[in-house]
Each structure stands twice: as structure tokens, then as C-alpha cells.
Image (cartoon, helix red, strand yellow):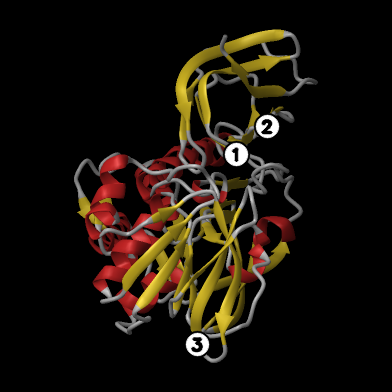
Amino acid sequence: MTTIVVGGGPAGLAAAIELRRLGAGRVVVLEREAEPGGVPRHCDHLGFGLLDLHRLLGGPRYAARYAALAERAGVEIRSRTSVTDWAAPMEVGTTSPRGVETISADAIVLATGCRERPRSARLVPGTRPAGVFTTGALQQIVHLQRERVGRRAVVVGAEHVSFSAVLTLAQAGAEAVAMVTEYPAHQTYAPLAWFAAGRRGVPILTGARVAAIRGRDRVDGVDLADVATGARLAIACDTVVFTGDWIPDHELARRGALAMDGASRAPRVDQAGRTSARGVFACGNLVHAAETADVAALGGRGVARGVATFLHTGSWPAPPVHVTCVPPVRWVAPGAIDPGEPLDVFRLRVDEPCANVDLVVAQGTREIWRRRYSALVPNRSIRAEVGGSPALRAEEALIFRIEARS
């Protein structure tokens, strides 16, 4: 038996290691970068490994540890190998220094992760000078290529990764002159906001958006607009970093014609990570963009159990119950439920701040689960431990919605 894991980040490596531990046979990880480990390789700060490895590590050490564990487990890792398409339902086409190949398997796990939307996808007007990055590009330039990025930067966004960008700028000798968010407040934890930005005096400009980027060869400033009044503010800078605003790396899933979740734009999976295609699974930040690396790794470890069961039994349940949401809930993962298995943990996000509300899970007029929250914050993970085994009707979706409390 052979399992292909597409993606050598935390989710993919954790899935591969667990598959080997479960005796699932040959496991091949296909990784497009030169080294496995994913995004943590260039996140040179603490905050990795608490949930999955039970220790606090920096990003590069965390990535290296997973690569070492995979090697020790007998996982075959093919780096510099990009999966470009499907050659058959259980066969992928790859390109690598070895040339063009096709690889077949008994099961395939998609763990391709997610990415930040760049300036072009956010339709930010203005000129097209150098000095515009995403957080991922910034961290690769600073920590992997050891190059300078600029002297004065504006960070667009105020979620967890936005403050990581402020730390990276400081390590590169650049000053973050402002953080900009359309929300009324930042969306991270207060200690992280203070550690990264507060102690450095970085102002967080709320209720504002980037209206234009200025500069000819290099960025020389940005124009901000108040989202309520439209009033403009010009800030001089030579660097702009777009952070957050995640989208799954779902191109391969779409090429495979997998059923997609319209809200998260990820392949729709059930509790075991099963997609709409028999033998194809998905996990990690491909199905919930973006959670922390340890959450992604635990997701990969969990999907491995579903893969092992499939390899040993060939069982593939009937079409599951769909899971949908009502705004301001933006998306819910997983996006499907096998009614023959218990409900478990769901992860979701909201589009706007919510205070003193109930999160409700219902099927039709029947309420399945309810929990009160004093605050729900956009861009911050919400973990809903629904649990139980309610008798769900296969023809009707499970709906997540928010109700205001009186």
C-alpha cells in the first residue's frame, strides 16, 4: 500500500508520521520547496509545538524536528517536487529535477496549506513600485535569504500574523511606522500585541484601509482612507506588508474536481478528512485557513487515522450531511458530517466583532447545540466542541448561526 501526501508542512508531515506508526505501508511526501517543514521554517520566533509536541519551540526548530521525526519514521520525502495535476483518480503528475513523472497511490492526502492574498488580489490601487510584500515573502527574504527589506514599513492587518510581521521587520532592522486594520480593534491577544507592537510604539490605525500605494521605482508612501468617512491620511514609508486575508492553496483540489465549500473555498471534508473523491483526503490549513502550525499538525495526525481505516477496510461512507453557516459566521470546518460518526470539534471564523452572543448549531428547526460567548473576534479561531451523536437527517444541512442575547 502506498499513500501520497502532497505538502511537507506540519499537517503533511504529521499525517505521514502517524500513517507510518499505524502500519499504513509506504508513505511518500511530495514537497515543492527545497526543505520540508512548511511556513515555520521562516518564522523565526517562539510559539510552535505546544499542542502537538508539548514543548515551546521556535519555527525553524519546530520544522526541523518534524522533518527528523519523519525521516526516523521511514517516510519518503521528495523535496523540490511540485504536483502539477492529476494523471488519473489516484495518480498525480509531478515536476522536479528528475523531470516529469506520474506517481500512483492507494490513498492521497492533500496538505497544501494556505497563502495570504497579495496586493493584486486585494485590488489596492496606485503605482506598482518595489517594496510590497506579504508576510510569507517578507519572512523568506529576511530569514532564509538574509536580505534587507526597507527602513520604514506599513503593515496592513492587525491579526496574529500581522504582529509576527512586525517582529520580522524589527529583526531586519526596519521600523513598522503603522499597522492598519478595517476593524475597530486589533484581533490578536493583548500580550502579543504589546510584545510585538506596543513596546515599540507602533500605532494601530483602526477603521482604516489602504486606498493607494505611491512611488515610482520604490514605495514612497501609502494613502489611507477612513472606512466610515473616507477621510484620507498619507504616511511616508518604503515598505508595505500585506498580512492575513488567507485563502487555501486549493488549485490541486479544484483540478481534481473535488466538491468545494463555498464559504471557506476549501475542499469539503468530513470528520475523517474524506473529500468527495474516494481515497482522497484533505487536512491542515487547506481546510481551515489559517490555524496555528500545531493545530494543523494535529489535524494531519487525525486524518491519518481515517486514511489507515480506508486502506485496511476500503470503507467509504455514503454522501455526508453538509455543514453551512449564516453571516456573520464566515466559514466552518469540517464542511460535512458523516451521520454515522460522532460530532467532534468544529473550527470557525466570524466576519465582524460579536459581543454577548450565542453560537447555535441546528438542523432545520431542531437545535443541536448552543453555547454563550462574551466576545467573538474576526480573524481569530473559534473552537466549538459540539460532540455527541445526534440522529441527523441526511438530506438537510447542519447550520451554524449566531443569536444575540437580550
* Mark 1 surroundings within 10 Å by alpha-carbon count, few (fewer than 14), some (14 through 19), many (20 or more): some
Q: Is residue 398 left or right of residue 139?
A: right
Q: Which residue is denoted by mark 2 in the rendering?
A: 327
- Residue marked by disc 3: 218
Pointers 1 and 3 in contact (C-beta within 8 Å):
no
Which amino acid, mark 3?
Arg
| Residue type at numbered disc 2 | Pro
Helix, strand or loop at mark 3: loop
Task: Please report contact status of discs 2 and 1: CB closer than 8 Å, yes or no.
Answer: yes
Q: How far apart are labels 2 and 1 at the CA level?
A: 7 Å
Res. 390 image quadrant:
top right
Given residues 47 and 224, the one toward you in this image is 224
- The residue drawn where x is 53% and y is 57% is 114
> What residue is shown with label 1?
351
Where is residue 326 shown, x and y percent of the image? 69, 29
Is any atom of residue 239 visible in this view? yes
Q: Earlier in the sequence, mark 2 or mark 3?
A: 3
Most extreme residue toward the bottom is 217
Percent of width and height locating residue 148: 33, 83
Is 283 on the left-hand or right-hand side of 263? left
